[in-house]
Amino acid sequence: VETGSRDELGYLIKRVQQALRGAIDPALADIGLTMAQYALLYNLQLHPGASNADLARFAFVSPQAMVRVMAELERTGLLIRKASQAHARVLQAHLTPKGIRALAAAQRRVEDIHKVMLQGLSTSRVRALATDLAAVAEQLEGLSSGG
Amino acid sequence: VETGSRDELGYLIKRVQQALRGAIDPALADIGLTMAQYALLYNLQLHPGASNADLARFAFVSPQAMVRVMAELERTGLLIRKASQAHARVLQAHLTPKGIRALAAAQRRVEDIHKVMLQGLSTSRVRALATDLAAVAEQLEGLSSGG
DNA sequence: CACATGTCAGTTCGACTGACATTG
DNA sequence: CCAATGTCAGTCCAACTGACATGT
């Protein structure tokens, strides 16, 4: 099978990301989540009580981008927010029971897709892939912030 | 430096793709190109005379998505199209001299970014990365087409 | 007729910037 | 005053689907 046009990494990254979206989007649509919403819920599970600004940093996006995702999830009752005691301006988010259930269902779907996607790669290959992608991300992130 | 929240591959893919866009977008903006336009020109260089439908297939996107990119590049004179002799409905695209120059300039910028992004990875690591990403893409693409 | 191509139009998603109020 | 947070509003890119005309 042809890989496309070239081994160029940028091309491959885009292709994988697009294929991944194509697989995950419809799977999450059943549950009523978009990828961005899933990512937010996932990070919120890892960091209970995180603020909008916190979650934006975790996802490497602007806080304005996160506001809409957050608002929709709050509106549909998957999370609630209340003012921090320490700083009334900061709204800390928490998953609701409904949010926890939706996230769990979504994670099962996503993990199924992950399994398919990694078929044929050994554990050590997968580990190397993750390590190298993280290294690449850090180099690129240094580019924009550093110069 | 923390890598974020987890080693999850989907997360890393998205993060790399976003960081890559963040680096390439402004570099190409100088030249007056978007990433999609650059990708089209690049594929057109590899496949002179390709049609809109061809280029959509190379990029794994719908022909409708490609139409707008193509129209803009034709409008700004980076490519021209003329009807195929074999099939008048098919419009074959070719880079203009202006298009060739723009693409060359863009490629230099993109290659600089590639160099930075791969700093610290050996040639064999880069090769393994490309191989494994291609494998992952194929698995995912099989998912949507096959069921 | 079937089929591929090209196109227009509308929608969605997810990112961005600018501007502004609030809190500490 | 300054910095961080949260928000609204608008823009942009890039994908999608639906619908339709055209050419073989």
Image (cartoon, coloured by chain):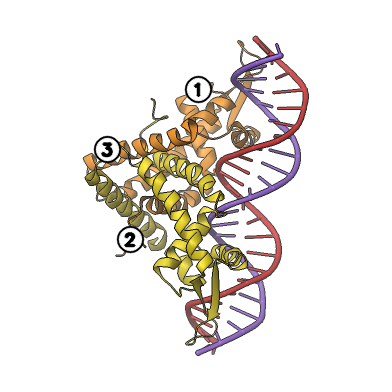
Chain colours: A orange, B yellow, C red, D purple
In-front residue for pair C5/B93? B93
Chain holding disc 2: A
Q: Gap between marks 3 and 1, in whole Å?
A: 27 Å
Residue depicted at x 60% and y 31%? A63
Q: Helix, strand, or loop for circle 2? A: loop
User: Where is residue B36 shown, x and y percent of the image?
Assistant: 51, 57
Kind of residue at badge 3: Arg
User: Which image quarter: residue A127?
Assistant: top left
User: Which image quarter: residue A3?
Assistant: bottom left
Name the quarter where the N terminus of chain A is drawn. bottom left
Badge 3 and badge 1 in a common chain:
yes
User: Where is residue A120 shown, x and y percent of the image?
Assistant: 24, 51
Report the residue marked by disc 3. A127
User: Where is residue C8 shown, x and y percent of the image?
Assistant: 68, 69
- Do we see residue B124 in this rendering? yes
User: Where is residue A24 shown, x and y percent of the image?
Assistant: 45, 48
Q: Helix, strand, or loop for circle 1? A: loop
| Label 1 environment density (alpha carbons within 10 Å; few <14, some 14–19, many ≥20) | few
**Disc number for residue A3:** 2
**Disc number for residue B7:** none
Report the residue marked by disc 1. A48
Q: Helix, strand, or loop for circle 3? A: helix
Kind of residue at badge 2: Thr
* Rendered view: C12 above or below A40: below
Horizontal placement of C19 versus C2: left or right?
right
- Do we see residue A101 in this rendering? no
Residue depicted at x 49% and y 37%? A39
In-front residue for pair A32/D17? D17
Chain holding disc 3: A
Q: Gap between marks 3 and 2, in whole Å?
A: 22 Å
User: Which image quarter: residue A66?
Assistant: top right
- Looking at the rendered image, the disc whose residue lies closer to the viewer, 1 or 2, is 2
